[in-house]
Amino acid sequence: MLEVSSITKIIDTFALKNINFEVKRGEYFVLLGKSGVGKTMLLEIIAGLLEPDSGHIILDGCDITKEKIQKRYIGIVYQDQALFPHLSVYENIAYPLRCLGQKGKEIDANVEQLAENIGFTHLLKRKPKTLSSGEAQRVALARTLATEPKCLLLDEPISSLDIQAKSEIRALLRKINRSGQSMIHVTHDYEEAISLATRIAVMEDGKISQVGSPQEVFQHPKSEFVAKFIGIKNVFKGELRNSGDELAEFMTNGKRFLLLSDKKSGKGTMILRSEDVTISNTNLQTSARNTFKGNIIDIEMDRLKSEVIVDIGVKISALITRDSLEKLGINFGKEVWVNFKATAPRYIEE
Amino acid sequence: MQLDNKTIIHRSKKPDTLELIFLAMGGLVLLFIIAPLAGMFINCSLGDLVDTAKDDAVQKSIWLTLWTAMAGTLILAFFAIPFSYLLARKNFPLKRLIAGIIDLPIVIPHSAAGIAILGVISRNSVIGRLAEKSGFSFVGSPAGIMVAMAFVSLPFLINGAREGFAAVPERLEKAARTLGATPFRVFFTISLPLAWRSVLSGLIMMWARGLSEFGAVIIIAYQPMITPVLIYDRFSSFGLKHALPVTVLFIFIVLIIFIFLRLLAENKNARS
């Protein structure tokens, strides 16, 4: 639906070099990268606020690279919301409608509808500076959605919010996406990416180094940068069962992991660093609450450490030293026990 | 801990020597401004003031001064406000040179400014001849006065408005563009309303500076007399005593309008 093709742009120290990716209709596409890699610049190029040095933006088969900003059907929500301070919440949302030439009653009806969908009918008369960060983000989203964009661009929409608002806005973004809205979301927070993305593009040094589903990207990082930046090989989609008073259970592919979490039961992702997984030849009595038997299906070595992949029904990656590798006599196909503590995994709710 | 707090509070209450000395110096500066003005008000009897207010020539000159300054400000504002937006937003070659040119009317002697303007609008110039053909003359007319006033006071509007526009976050304008607004719409619905206080303040400053102009105006038009010229005329023909009531009356009226407009500008800001 939206195709970014060979986009290059250099401003001072920022540079985008030959950026290529395609966002499919209804997709939640996350651009993940450290701050300062040019993510916002890329969004502004897609929105038409910046002109690329070379390359094309193609929306539904039409080249919109040189199209006027107001005729692109692309909406952008900024990290700081960019609400118009001199206008009420109502007038902020009515702004794009007035640009479309709508009048009194029609605007009333549309603003009401949007406010209801996004959940802030009680705020319509307020001025932006009296809103909390979460409320302001809702208003900003509604204002952009009023333009009925073909693609919605989100520049770090969650990072600046307080914790309570973070999970509310996440849920809202998911809801908007489920209604069929194609979205590109820029963030530096991998948890946000895991929680929301249909696909992730990792940006590094002005380039896209990898594109894929969250699992692909996290389990098979293509460059050292991605591996370092993300650092997490074990990513499992599944379901959390949390009664609240004991350890929570996480079910994935018939396996049951125990973990500490204060999140409510429901669907989500469990992530576990390879460093936190240990390997033994026998079933040891340790404090680790998760112990599984499986066969080694892959070993990747470098000078000091080895990554060992064990199939325990799901693939689990453990990082051990070369020294341990030799002492344990680890080789391909060997049956071993993998262990990790219930405090090691992190659960990210959907 | 509590004791510490107390000592700090105690200290901040008692100004130190430096503050006392600077305060005294500040008092002298204020006195320097207020004393001559206050002295004038004190020396002027109420009877003289009432008589002067009834004087036809005085009334006419005050009215002329107020409206020519206002008209000059409004006409130039139409061109200068969009220009200050450009100066605030865009980078272009020779921008610093242009900023310097805009400040020129402030730094050159105002009589010199008058001479320069006269060269452009006198009967010997192209513009002057054109005006002559359409049946009027800049020299010795309200139109000429307007030009002279606007020339010397324009920098106050441009600089004020430019600062106002520069303070409007560019991101708001970008957001408005992506919401479907044309650049014109963005200017009128976002940039101008958000910069309005500075623009208004610039307008007031330009108007105030224009109506107090003497040097440039007297070279273009001794007659009809604006009040600053009338004050000079009375002083040179009849002496200090006769110039005083006009001066006091003029300052009084201008101050009242000035304070009223300032309050209006502040009020507008408080509401938004």
Image (cartoon, grey):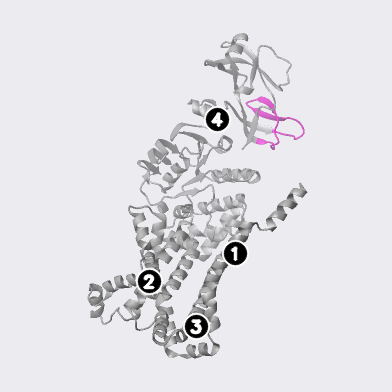
> In the rendered structure, the residue with mark 3 lies on which chain?
B
Residue A62, horizontal then vertical, whole percent: 37, 45
Q: Amino acid at mark 3?
A: Leu
**Mark 4 vs mark 2: same chain?**
no
Choose mark 3 or mark 4, whichever is in front: 3
Q: Which residues are magenta?
A: A241-266
The residue under label 4 is A230
The residue under label 3 is B249
Q: Earlier in the sequence, mark 2 or mark 1?
A: 1
A105 and B40: which is toward the camera: B40
> In the rendered structure, the residue with mark 4 lies on which chain?
A
> In the rendered structure, the residue with mark 2 lies on which chain?
B
Residue A82, horizontal then vertical, whole percent: 52, 52
Examine the structure image and report whether residue A43 is included in the region drawn in magenta: no
Q: Earlier in the sequence, mark 3 or mark 2?
A: 2
Q: Pointer 3 and pointer 4: residues touching (CB < 8 Å)?
A: no
* Residue B24: mark in rendering: 1
Q: Quadrant of residue A130?
A: bottom right
Q: Amino acid at mark 4?
A: Ile
The residue under label 2 is B150
Q: Pointer 4 and pointer 1: residues touching (CB < 8 Å)?
A: no
